[in-house]
Image (tube, grey):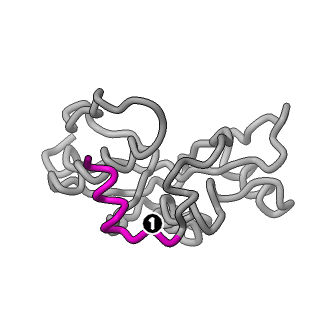
Amino acid sequence: LGLAENRRVYVAPAFQLKNSLGADPPRTKDQLMQLRAAGTIDQVHNDPGRKRAHNYTNYPRWYTATEPYPIEYSFPYEPYFVSHASIPKWDANFLGYGNDKTEHALELHTAGYEFWVLPGMFVTHKDHPPSDWAREPDETKAQRLSRVLR
């Protein structure tokens, strides 16, 4: 990779199967789109309290994308991504659950990394109970940032 590409992270849009017990996740974008049309898969955390953590991926654009596209970072983005091995490492001081991906994405953004979405890559997410921040849908970005960076 060239220097510019080393300053990029490549986002994999995240999806969640509804009623996913025992369901096989899709393996291709075509399979995912069929499940979406049937109403059995959707953007991960697509509910009022948690939607903001993944919306910056721009899911409507991804559905029809055939080329990678850049997105504008905004806190509290918490994408799943792949990158060059030289990126700042994950903060190993995180204990418990929540805000780990958010802090890492913020650190990457602050260090000048760009977020690019890949049109053929995605991940499926296993549901889990909401974190503290999801139970506070009216929390401002400043309040969450203060809590994340304690």
Q: Position of residue 134 (x, y in %)?
A: 55, 57
- Residue type beneath disc 1: Tyr
Query: Number of callouts in the render?
Result: 1
- The residue positioned 45% from the left and 66% from the top of the image is 56
Q: Nearer the viewer, residue 25 or 21?
A: 21
Q: Quadrant of the N terminus?
A: top left
In the rendered image, the vertical position of residue 114 relative to residue 95, given as above or below: below
Count residues near mark 1 (Cα–Cα under 10 Å), then give few for <14, some for 14-19, many for 20+: some
Q: Position of residue 54 (x, y in %)?
A: 50, 59
> From the viewer's perspective, is 74 left or right of 87?
right
Q: Position of residue 68 (x, y in %)?
A: 42, 59
> From the viewer's perspective, is 56 left or right of 15?
left
> From the viewer's perspective, is 97 left or right of 2?
right
- The residue positioned 47% from the left and 62% from the top of the image is 57
Which secondary structure lies at badge 1? helix
Q: Nearer the viewer, residue 140 or 123?
A: 140
Q: Is residue 87 magenta?
A: no
Q: Which residues are magenta?
A: 138-150
- The residue positioned 27% from the left and 33% from the top of the image is 91
Q: Nearer the viewer, residue 142 or 77?
A: 142
Residue 95 location, quadrant: top left
**Magenta-colored segment: predominant secondary structure:** helix
Q: Position of residue 13 (x, y in %)?
A: 53, 53
> From the viewer's perspective, is 46 left or right of 25?
left
Please give the residue where the numbered disc 1 appears in the rendered image.
Answer: 56
- The residue positioned 80% from the left and 50% from the top of the image is 18
Q: Is residue 143 magenta?
A: yes
In the rendered image, the vertical position of residue 87 relative to residue 66, given as above or below: above
